Amino acid sequence: MLLVSACGRGGRPTEDVLPGGIPARTDLHRASSLPPQAIRTVARRDFGWRVIYHPGSAPANADQQAAVALCRLENRRVDRIEHVASAAPGDDPGTRLIDIFCG
């Protein structure tokens, strides 16, 4: 039991702080109104944010909603959104990978 509790957070949102004092959030679906089943991965990178989501489960403006929500965490505006080709398209068919740059 002790080993299991040490390995994870049990699905609770994190209160961690990312480099630069940016609060980490694991509830992007609440911040952006994206359905939880659409979001696959959200990661903070040196350039900004990388998001992998399933567009078939998301609204048409999912890229913009995610970008606004994530840049808002940093109190910045969206600079640009770049679509990135998947390195391994067979890993999760139908997903879209985007990089979000905040200005």
Image (cartoon, rainbow, N blue to C red):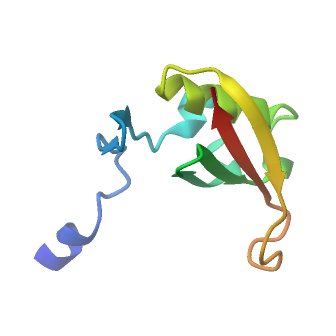
Relative to residue 87, is residue 102 drawn left or right? left
Which residue occupies the foreground of this view, 7 or 67? 67
Which quarter of the picture shows residue 62?
A: top right
The residue that appears at 71% across and 28% down in the rendered structure is 79
Q: Position of residue 16 (x, y in %)?
A: 29, 44
- Vertical placement of 13 versus 78: above or below? below
**Image position, residue 96 (x, y; %):** 80, 56
Q: Residue at x 55, y 31 (%)?
A: 30
Say which residue appears at 80% left-offset and 60% top-offset. 95
Report whether residue 85 is seen: yes
Which residue in the rendered view is the most extreme toward the left? 2
Quarter of the view holding residue 67: top right
Q: Is residue 1 visible?
A: no
Question: Which of 60/22 is in front?
Answer: 22
Which quarter of the rendering shows the C terminus? top right
Residue placed at 17% from the left, 78% from the top? 3
Quarter holding the N terminus? bottom left
Tell whether 8 sits left or right of 35. left
Q: Position of residue 52 (x, y in %)?
A: 69, 55
Residue 29 located left or right of residue 87:
left
Percent position of residue 29, x then y: 59, 37
* Residue 71, image quadrant: top right
Pick whichever, 24 or 20, lies toward us: 20
Above or below, comparing residue 9 to residue 71 in the picture: below
